Amino acid sequence: MEKTVSEAIAYRRSVRIYKEDIELDNEIVRKCLLNASLAPTSSNMQLWEFYHVTDKTKLKALSKACFDQPAAKTAKQLVVVVTRKDLWRKRSKANLDFLKKGFEKTTDKKDSTREKFVLNYYKKLIPTLYTEFLGILGALRFIFFQIVGLFRPIYRQVRKSDMRIVAHKSAALAAQNFMISMSAVGYDTCPMEGSDTLRIKRILDLPWGAEINMVIACGVRDDKGVYGPRFRIPFEEVYHKV
């Protein structure tokens, strides 16, 4: 029986050593990755990909690229979360085509204003934010938006580096969905940032525009896999009611 959300969150730990004799069900891990794809994402752009690695040769190569840290070396499977900001045109068009079909089915006049706004959002605003040339367009956008911001609230994260951060934030949300889903079915994970991302891209044959968000080790925890009690800063220090 699957755990509740709260139970799954409480059960989840960054597990660094996995049991050697327990394999994972590929289909269950795949379903957890399906849950990852349902995570919220900026402008519904879904600029992510998930590489579910089960091949022993690839696992060994990826472990080396992750410096053979225990979580990677003992993992039964690995999931590599990848950002694909370079696919923004394709993903924007997919959203646009989907929305157009939806609006074709309605005759409600109230939807006409919403239709105009939404379609312009993907036809005009998204290209304005994502089109780039050597970082120059991003710098120009930043200056323009800062000037407009003197007179009214405006979105200010418009540089090339800002859009990378947006893609990575969305990918991280998806990764959390995956890890909580794994926890709910009794599987364990460990998100790893310590890795040679260039080597990982080569191992997975990823294109130049792809970026590694994180590598997630997967398995069933060994008794030695959790290194100690959970420590968190007192909640009162991080909670602020306004």
Image (cartoon, rainbow, N blue to C red):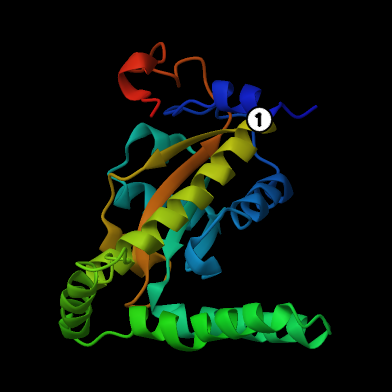
Residue 197 pos. (x, y %) = 29, 59
Residue 135, can we see it? yes
Task: Name the one closer to the observer, 51 or 166.
Answer: 166
**Amino acid, disc 1:** Val
On-image quarter of the C terminus: top left
Residue drawn at (37%, 32%) of the image: 70
Residue drawn at 52 percent across, 86 percent down? 120
Residue positioned 40% across, 25% down in the render: 241
Please give left or right for residue 201 compared with residue 41 in the image: left
Q: Position of residue 129 (x, y in %)?
A: 35, 78
The answer to which quarter of the image holds residue 171 is bottom left
* Rendered location of residue 34, percent (x, y): 67, 55
Pick the residue in front: 231 or 59.
231
User: Would residue 11 appear left or right of 98 to someone viewing this image?
Assistant: left
Q: Residue at x 60, y 78 (%)?
A: 95
Residue 160 versus residue 176 in the image, above or below: below
The image quadrant of residue 82 is bottom left
Query: On the rendered structure, is 97 left or right of 173?
Result: right
Q: Pointer 1: residues within 10 angstroms few (<14), some, or many (20+)?
A: few
Check the image and report above or below for 95 versus 185.
below
* Residue at mark 1: 5
> Is residue 46 something one can see in this rendering?
no
The secondary structure type at the circle numbered 1 is: helix
The x, y position of residue 74, in whole percent, is 45, 35
On the image, which quarter does residue 100 sit in? bottom right
In this view, the residue in front, 24 or 171, is: 171
Camera-nearest residue between 238 and 79: 238
Q: Quadrant of the N terminus?
A: top right
